[in-house]
Image (cartoon, rainbow, N blue to C red):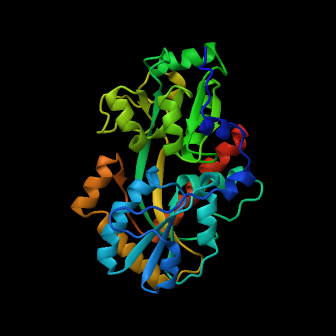
């Protein structure tokens, strides 16, 4: 039987509307010497403002900050981080799509807000391919399929059997409508012909406490979020969604090798990169691309990313643009095929 107590955060996740989401903006955070006041950044011509469309402490935020610290030194410019979460990352990204192409405003982009979320909304605030200038693809991060210890499943085979026996009894938390955690879960449900109830939060940081308390019982989230609870027994990791096992959780099998026949080709990872507004001059794009490719290979940055379970990618702006286009097609097709809707 499910616990009777539902936290305010969970209740909010069940009933919130897009209009409420649009009004919610998390305060910017200060971390590692980076100022977080966007108004100050706009007033200073030598500063770059990086808009992260997710909350402080979320996976995007944790990955971006060590890279931006190193980029400050490489460029000789201050970089301020402006966390603007909401609507699966659309709110913050839309602001950058409208910014002047002067190199002072950049976006931290993810598969969620640049490949998935625009397909979920009837009138998205931007076109992910037309309204941005791709600068550099930086890294990828696998997800982990976790259950609360109260769930009587110790393998993915057992979880699938449980979900088939009791469809609709179990809830899963996501980091928001249209995010990669939402779509990975829906893809898993479709592949395994199971059903669990989607409980969207504004970020992983908000969903995790309810998951750890057992108020939601399943979570499909990045290894950044999942590693701690999976390692100390607060959660049970059943599989990673990457093609190969993660060095951070080497004992956890991939979904492909879990023994579930329907998942033998299952693979999905989150990716992260930097974009500029449309029309950003080529010289600025090349300068930023070269600097980002340099800093993501610095030993201290590589270590930070590896500790978060991320794999360094890098590459040219054109390669990033091609990757983005293929991901829009992949996830858009999934949204249409599964008729995935925001909750």
Q: Residue 63's image quarter?
A: bottom left
Query: Closest to the observer: 323 or 90?
Result: 90
Q: Residue 89's image quarter?
A: bottom right
Residue depicted at 65% across the width and 25% down the height: 195
Residue depicted at 41% across the width and 37% down the height: 226
Residue 223 to residue 288: above or below: above
* Residue 319 coordinates in the image, percent (x, y): 46, 65
Query: Closest to the observer: 258 or 68?
Result: 68
Determine if residue 270 is in view.
yes
Q: Name the outermost residue toward the right.
A: 122
Residue 70 to residue 86: above or below: below
Query: Closest to the observer: 27 or 237?
Result: 27
* Residue 43 coordinates in the image, percent (x, y): 51, 84
Residue 229 to residue 23: above or below: above
Residue depicted at 44% across the width and 56% down the height: 61
Determine if residue 266 is in view.
no
Residue 56 to residue 282: above or below: above
Q: With 133 as the anchor, is 244 left or right in this view?
A: left
Q: With 320 as the anchor, is 182 left or right in this view?
A: right
Q: Quadrant of the C terminus?
A: top right
Q: Name the outermost residue toward the left.
A: 299
Q: With 341 as the anchor, is 260 left or right in this view?
A: left
Residue depicted at 45% across the width and 82% down the height: 284
* Residue 69 coordinates in the image, percent (x, y): 33, 67
* Residue 6 coordinates in the image, percent (x, y): 62, 29
Q: Quadrant of the N terminus?
A: top right
Q: How many marks?
A: 0
């Amino acid at each position: 039987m499910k616990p009777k107590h539902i936290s305010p955060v969970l209740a909010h996740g069940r009933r919130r509307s897009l209009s409420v989401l649009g009004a919610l903006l998390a305060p910017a955070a200060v971390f590692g010497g980076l100022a977080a006041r966007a108004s100050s950044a706009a007033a200073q011509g030598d500063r770059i403002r990086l808009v992260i469309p997710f909350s402080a402490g979320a996976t995007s935020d944790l990955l971006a900050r060590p890279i931006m610290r190193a980029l400050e030194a490489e460029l000789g410019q201050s970089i301020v981080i402006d966390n603007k979460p909401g609507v699966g990352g659309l709110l913050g990204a839309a602001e950058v799509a409208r910014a002047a192409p002067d190199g002072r405003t950049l976006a931290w982009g993810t598969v969620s807000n640049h490949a998935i979320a625009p397909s979920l909304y009837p009138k998205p605030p931007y076109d992910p391919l037309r309204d941005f200038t791709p600068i550099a693809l930086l890294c990828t991060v696998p997800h982990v399929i976790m259950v609360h210890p109260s769930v009587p499943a110790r393998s993915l085979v057992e979880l699938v059997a449980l979900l088939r026996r009791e469809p609709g009894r179990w809830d899963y938390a996501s980091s928001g409508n249209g995010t990669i955690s939402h779509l990975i879960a829906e893809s898993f449900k479709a592949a395994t012909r199971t059903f669990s109830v989607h409980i969207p939060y504004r970020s992983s940081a908000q969903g995790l406490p309810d998951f750890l308390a057992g108020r939601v019982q399943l979570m499909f989230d990045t290894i950044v979020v999942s590693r701690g609870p999976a390692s100390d027994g607060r959660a049970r990791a059943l599989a990673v969604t990457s093609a190969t096992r993660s060095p951070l959780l080497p004992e956890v099998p991939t979904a492909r090798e879990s023994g579930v026949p329907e998942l033998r080709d299952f693979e999905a990872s989150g990716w992260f990169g930097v974009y500029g507004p449309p029309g950003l001059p080529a010289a600025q794009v090349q300068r930023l691309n070269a600097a980002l490719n340099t800093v993501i290979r610095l030993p201290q940055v590589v270590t930070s990313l590896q500790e978060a379970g991320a794999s360094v990618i890098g590459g040219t702006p054109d390669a990033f643009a091609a990757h983005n286009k293929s991901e829009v097609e992949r996830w858009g097709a999934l949204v249409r095929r599964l008729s995935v809707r925001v909750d």
